[in-house]
Image (spheres, rainbow, N blue to C red):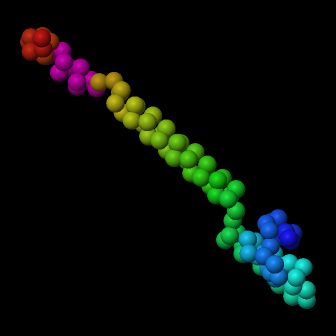
């Protein structure tokens, strides 16, 4: 029973490459594959987790700003025109 030197998975008897990670095995001497850099296209799960965390933090920030702006617009003091109208309504007995 042989194991992959790259990922440690069990190898199929006579396999030239690991079926899990693609690492060349000792059973395939003389075959050399070039290393390929995918330029960040193929990223691991750790980067995906980091991206998810950044997205969650960004969304939380946007929601926090929206909440603060919403509170500011709904709790603003009445304008002077509103105060005058309220005074007239109180003096004429329109408000109970």
Does the magenta segment cover residue 82?
yes
Q: In the rendered image, which quarter is residue 31 located in? A: bottom right
Residue in front for this viewpoint, 45 or 7:
7
Viewed as shown, does residue 47 lie left or right of 13?
left
Residue in front for this viewpoint, 85 or 13:
13
For the point 91% across and 89% down, the residue is 30
Residue 18 at x, y = what percent? 78, 75
Residue 76 visible in rendering: yes
Q: In the rendered image, which quarter is residue 34 located in? A: bottom right
Residue 64 at x, y = what percent? 49, 38
Look at the image and tell me in which quarter the C terminus lies.
Answer: top left
Q: In the rendered image, which quarter is residue 29 located in? A: bottom right
**In the image, residue 35 above or below residue 66:** below
Does the magenta segment cover residue 14?
no
Viewed as shown, does residue 85 lie left or right of 93?
right
Look at the image and tell me in which quarter the N terminus lies.
Answer: bottom right
**In the image, residue 40 above or below residue 28:** above
Residue 34 visible in rendering: no
Residue in front for this viewpoint, 42 or 78:
42
* Prevailing secondary structure class for the magenta stretch in the rendered image: helix
Give the extent of the magenta segment: 79-88
């Amino acid at each position: 029973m042989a194991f992959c030197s790259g990922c440690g998975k069990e190898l199929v008897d006579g396999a030239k490459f690991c079926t899990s990670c693609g690492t060349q095995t000792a059973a395939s001497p003389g075959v050399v594959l070039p290393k390929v850099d995918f330029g960040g296209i193929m990223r691991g799960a750790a980067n995906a987790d980091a991206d998810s965390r950044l997205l969650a933090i960004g969304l939380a920030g946007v929601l926090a700003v929206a909440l603060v702006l919403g509170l500011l617009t709904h709790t603003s003091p009445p304008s002077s025109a509103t105060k005058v109208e309220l005074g007239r309504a109180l003096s004429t007995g329109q408000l109970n």
